[in-house]
């Protein structure tokens, strides 16, 4: 990921130093596994743990000659250990190190993602409560529909985020597996007891049936879950963009005192952060196809997946982490204009109450089709004659329509909806 969209946390997680340290963690766990079955003395293990070292530049220099990163790493850490280092990487293959260490790295990356996700969820819920009863016109197809509340809109985003959290948690558990089972996964040169010890030491589950690699469906599922999460964040950002248009002006991003919205037009306050979130969601979804194509490898494996994962997994986790941080700032700082929401709700001259008039006519004994034609005719008069909906109804219905034009009618069940989400835990 380019520096502009890289967070410090993800930069550290996916750094070369962290990668090589995780490789070493796996190598040492395997060495302890060999000691647990009597192949290596615990004295030798302790000596190796105390004296093993590496330099990133040293690994790079070796890789330039060997053209194999794990082989270069093994040579680097074995040097200086003498005879006691001969059981480093004993009986295992590169993918035992790569896939197991990848699980450790992903575990760290996902920790930071869940941290930001949970903080965003709390912000969304707080703001939903803040605007629980704030009326806003609901829009379908971009056209005024009926009144709702801004709090309900935010509560909808909150519940979606909780669903995405649950999906991501399941996907995360799926990738937290390793394998220490050798070149084709059949434990020919390393017994299952060594794997069991090493993975328990590292806090990972084992791949039940490995080839040379862990199943790539696991990473495809993770990137898919991250992409769904990103699309949910895009949904929030897109709504804020729509509500910040000049003609609507109900919500806008926070704007700093010295900030500039345009190099040419000093009046501009553009929803640039929300636009960035939308763009990054597109970028992340683009990674789904290559990671899905990694699932099918030749026989016990080829290496076509490697180049894809070296780009996709760091980028996908970094993108989501960046988006979550962005959305925290956007949602916590967004400026909400309740007065403009009220004006816009009545901009269509009362047409948003058309269904209530329809239902009142039906309740008074009129056939639905007849009632619909009457209300629709009055609605068309609003557009064609420039009158209000109330005025248009005067000559078409025989009852007092004033009580029907009550915004609070549409808030009758807001508390119930909030309660079933917050108290009842209904979000799935």
Image: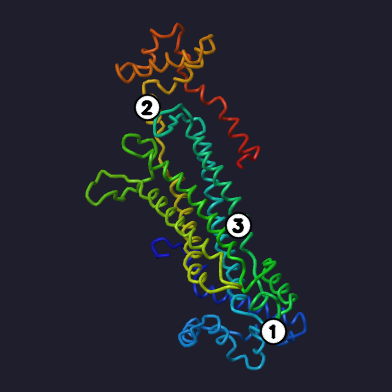
Give the mark toward the camera: 3 or 2. Answer: 3
Q: Which residue is mark 1?
A: 46
- Distance, label 1 to label 3, CA atoms, is 36 Å
Q: Could you say where residue 265 lies in the image, as x and y percent from the top left? A: 23, 46
Tell which circle, 1 or 3, labels the residue nearer the N-terminal end: 1
Q: Nearer the viewer, residue 218 or 165?
A: 218
Q: What is the quadrant of residue 396 in the picture?
A: top left
Q: Nearer the viewer, residue 5 or 356?
A: 356
Q: What is the quadrant of residue 100 in the picture?
A: bottom right
- Distance, label 3 to label 2, CA atoms, is 45 Å
Farthest residue to the right: give it.
38
Task: Decide if residue 59 is on the left or right side of residue 420.
Answer: left
Q: Nearer the viewer, residue 229 or 134?
A: 229
What is the crowding at mark 1: few (fewer than 14 residues within 10 Å), some, or many (at least 20)?
A: few
Q: Which residue is mark 3?
A: 171
Q: Which residue is mark 2?
A: 343
The quadrant the N terminus occupies is bottom left
Label 3's element?
Answer: helix
Residue at x 77% of width, y 84% of height: 38
C-beta proximity under 8 Å, tags 3 and 2: no
Residue at x 49% of width, y 34% of height: 131
Q: Could you say where residue 273 lies in the image, as x and y percent from the top left? A: 38, 50
Task: Please state the total of marks drawn on the protein image.
Answer: 3
Up/down of 425 relative to 54, above or below = above
């Amino acid at each position: 990921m380019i520096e502009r969209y890289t967070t410090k946390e993800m930069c550290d997680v996916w750094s070369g130093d962290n990668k090589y340290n995780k490789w070493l963690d796996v190598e040492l766990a395997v060495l302890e596994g060999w000691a647990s079955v009597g192949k290596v003395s615990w004295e030798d293990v302790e000596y190796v743990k105390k004296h093993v070292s590496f330099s990133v530049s040293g690994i790079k220099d070796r890789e330039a000659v060997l053209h194999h990163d794990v082989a270069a790493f093994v040579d680097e850490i074995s040097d200086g250990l003498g005879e006691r280092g001969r059981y480093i990487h004993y009986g295992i293959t590169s993918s035992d190190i790569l896939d197991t260490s990848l699980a450790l790295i992903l575990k760290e990356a996902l920790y930071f993602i869940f941290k930001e996700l949970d903080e965003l969820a709390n912000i969304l819920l707080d703001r939903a409560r803040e605007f629980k009863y704030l009326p806003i016109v609901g829009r379908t197809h971009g056209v005024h529909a009926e009144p709702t509340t801004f709090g309900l809109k935010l509560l909808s985003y909150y519940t979606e985020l909780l669903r995405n959290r649950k999906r991501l948690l399941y996907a995360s558990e799926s990738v937290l597996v390793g394998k220490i089972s050798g070149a084709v996964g059949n434990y020919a040169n390393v017994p299952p007891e060594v794997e069991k010890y090493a993975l328990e030491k590292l806090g990972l589950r084992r791949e039940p049936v490995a080839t040379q690699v862990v199943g790539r469906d696991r990473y495809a599922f993770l990137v898919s879950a991250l992409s769904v999460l990103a699309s949910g964040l895009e949904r929030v950002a897109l709504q804020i963009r729509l509500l910040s248009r000049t003609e609507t002006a109900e919500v806008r991003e926070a704007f700093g005192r010295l900030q500039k919205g345009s190099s040419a037009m000093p009046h501009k306050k553009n929803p640039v952060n929300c636009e960035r979130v939308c763009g990054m969601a597109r970028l992340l979804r683009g990674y789904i196809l290559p990671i899905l194509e990694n699932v099918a490898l030749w026989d016990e494996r080829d290496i076509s997946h490697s180049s894809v994962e070296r780009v996709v997994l760091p980028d996908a986790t970094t993108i989501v982490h960046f988006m979550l941080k962005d959305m925290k700032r956007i949602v916590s700082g967004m400026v909400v204009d309740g007065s403009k929401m009220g004006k816009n709700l009545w901009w269509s001259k009362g047409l948003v109450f058309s269904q209530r008039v329809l239902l009142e006519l039906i309740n008074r004994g009129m056939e639905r089709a007849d009632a619909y034609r009457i209300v629709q005719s009055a609605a068309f008069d609003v557009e064609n004659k420039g009158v209000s909906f109330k005025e248009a109804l005067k000559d078409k219905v025989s009852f007092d329509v004033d009580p029907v034009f009550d915004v609070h009618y549409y808030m009758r069940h807001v508390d119930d909806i909030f309660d079933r989400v917050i108290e009842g835990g209904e979000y799935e």
